[in-house]
Image: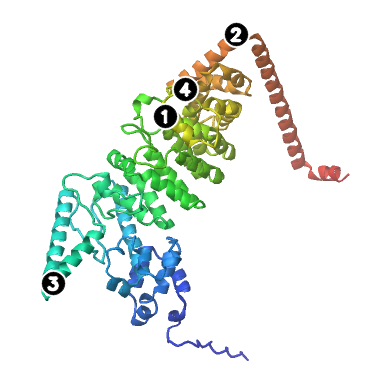
Amino acid sequence: PVAAAPPAASFDVGTETPIYDVGADVMAKILTYLKPTEVYSVVSMPLSKTFKSTFSNTQDLWKVLCLSAPFYAKVDKSRENSDDSIKSYPLCKNKDADTKHLLGRYRLLYSSFIQCIRYLDRIKEDAKNGRKPAGIYVNEEQSQFSYEENDSLTNFFATAHQLKRKERNDSDDSRSSGARSSQKRRKAANEHKKKPKIKYGVSKLTTKLLGPQHAVGIAGHVGLPWSCAMYSVTNWMVAFADVAGIQLMCLKVLPNLLVDEQQRTSAQHIGLTDVVLRAMVLFPQMVELHTAAFHTLVLLARPLGGKEGMLFHSAMVKADGIFNIGSSTGKSGIAIMLDSMKRFVEDEDLQAMSCWSMVNIALIPSQKVVLVRLGGISSAANAMIHHPHNAEVQFRALFALINLVIPSENLTNNSVEIHEINEQIAGMNQDSEIEMLDESIEQVTNLVVVAMKNFCSSEAILNRACLVLHNLSLNAAYHKALLLTPNCYQMLEWCIGNYRHDNVLQQSACGTLSRLQQTISSDRSLRHEFTESIRAQEQQAVQFARNDAAILARNDAVMLDPLVFLDADAN
């Protein structure tokens, strides 16, 4: 006989639907399968009255959502029981006490996150489709200042002024009744003066008007039209300085804006560099955030009017760099970048992006000096050592070395730049730029040759490698290292013979060989060392070939009669 199935387990719960009895933590885990905007829609527009009373109206679920992925917000625990703990966040500082008490601080905070995401998604979507991004995204919960048409700055500020005047008139009318109306108006006016006011420009935007106040950490507008989107994104980052998720989202969107020269100019002057570097310091273990930050720095350091990767010509770039304009960080920002490269040396994406950022940063003489003296050359070399078979890392590192191996000659010893440089590296490294290069010349030369051999079919990598060797050969003191580095001379000859249509490669390789040949012809002892080095390399190549042939022969024999070799190994 077939045994009867056991009775179904009964739920000893107080409701008919068990889902309502799970805690806020479990519900938050369930909601992680949805996008943040979808999570907000589900919780703010509940499925039932029970769901509303259990989750939507309480702060537990909203708090877990704010503190967990993808936002990881940090709330000041000492001020957690006060509404002032989030007063600096957008959408929260404009709410009155009744609204805060009705909705709750964490729901307001999460709604601020959603507004930021929608603004950023609008920029990404427009950039992806190749169209000019539109104005502010107006969400379901109308903010205190909602502007329907703000593609034009004139319309934007005109509407803003109208709303402000209407609010003032309404408030005056509401206080006009009563015996103490005049006293209330005076009191309200005094309180209004004490509160920080949002200022609106009349004819043009200025950094002081729309940008954040870095000294006190106060953000400006977060819903500006496309022409001022850089201000809004920067203000979002300032407002949510301790929210890792918002920082990462903004950093991923910034490259879409920074490709535009006008936006890039605004970013340099409002101190975006400081904001990006601060995010790298506050979240030192987030490799994804650091990679996105390096991508932002790549475009921030791009010379105005030019493209990334321009060779070192001071006349083609401005005298001030990203660590001078609108920035209080100074060259210490370079130390932050190099520290990140050292910390995430195993991450190939970060290493490639960080080497790319060094390409543009090294275009400014003062920045290049600090970059070299703080270990920029060794950082690029470490990237090449840890990722020898990654073409992107090798290409970017070689590109960075092109400028880093050229000493800066246009900085006089008594210049203000030299004084600032010494202040920035005080207590870090007292070696000069030339001394740092002298210490790494043999390692750099060997790594360049190894990259040329590993990627002999990549014309782009060989092109940059030949440029690095060309710049090293400009200093006669480095000729010996170039000549005695195994396969360096031969690889230059091989490149000339196999890439005849690359004019830059031909000029750099031929120029390097010409200088080396002149040194050999004038130095007998060096010529003897070079000859012996070539002979030793040939003998070593022959020995390697014999070893490889022996290994192949043994493998073939094992495949024919494996038992014979098993018996031989046993004996």
Identity of the residue drawn at 51% across and 38% down: 393
Asked if residue 557 lies left or right of residue 199, the reply is: right
Under circle 4, the secondary element is: helix
Q: CA separation, marks 2 and 4?
A: 24 Å
Circle 1 residues within 10 Å: few <14, some 14–19, many ≥20: some
State the residue position of label 1. 417
Q: CA separation, marks 2 and 1?
A: 41 Å
Q: Quadrant of the N terminus?
A: bottom right
Q: CA separation, marks 1 and 4?
A: 34 Å
Tell me the number on the disc at residue 521: 2
- Residue lying at the far right in this picture: please name it: 571
Q: Earlier in the sequence, mark 1 or mark 4?
A: 1
Q: Earlier in the sequence, mark 2 or mark 4?
A: 4
Asked if the residue at tag 4 contacts the one at tag 3, i.e. Cβ–Cβ closer than 8 Å, the answer is no
Under circle 3, the secondary element is: helix
Using the image, determine if residue 272 lies above or below residue 163: above
State the residue position of label 3. 181
